């Protein structure tokens, strides 16, 4: 039995779909947990996906 072809996901090339990540600073809080900073992807505005752009050829 054949399987349907899934739709192509338009995942951001810059963040690979992980639009917000937590980066450790190397410091620790008073309770011993790591101090983190949230970083967001600027290319996709933290959505993880990009718009589909249709390229058109211009006749000269």
Image: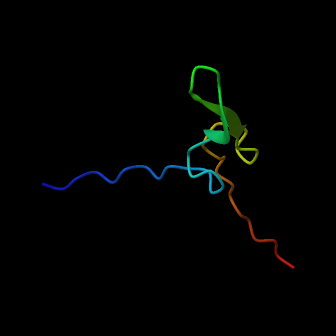
**Quadrant of res 42:** top right
Image coords of residue 39 (percent x, y): 70, 39
Q: Is residue 20 visible?
A: no
Residue 49 is left or right of residue 44, and the answer is left
Which color scheme did the rendering employ for the protein?
rainbow
Who is closer to the viewer here, 8 or 43?
Answer: 43
* Furthest residue toward top: 31
Residue at x 81%, y 71% (from the top left corner): 58
Residue at x 61%, y 44% (from the top left corner): 49
Image coords of residue 53 (percent x, y): 69, 55
Residue at x 65%, y 47% (from the top left corner): 50
Image coords of residue 44 (percent x, y): 70, 44
Who is closer to the viewer here, 60 or 15?
Answer: 15
**Quadrant of res 13:** bottom right
* Furthest residue toward bottom: 60
Q: Is residue 11 above or below residue 29?
A: below
Residue at x 47%, y 53% (from the top left corner): 8
Q: Is residue 58 above or below residue 31?
A: below
Residue 50 is left or right of residue 56, and the answer is left
Q: Is residue 27 visible?
A: yes
Who is closer to the viewer here, 53 or 40?
Answer: 40
Quarter of the image containing the N terminus?
bottom left
Image coords of residue 56 (percent x, y): 74, 65
Q: Is residue 29 above or below residue 40?
A: above
Give the number of marks. Answer: 0
* Furthest residue toward left: 1
Quarter of the image containing the C terminus?
bottom right
């Amino acid at each position: 039995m054949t399987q349907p072809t899934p739709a192509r996901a338009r995942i951001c090339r810059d963040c690979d779909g992980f639009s917000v990540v937590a980066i450790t600073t190397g410091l620790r809080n008073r309770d011993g947990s790591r101090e983190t900073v949230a970083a967001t992807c600027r290319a996709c505005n933290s959505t993880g996906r990009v718009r589909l752009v249709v390229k058109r050829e211009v006749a000269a």
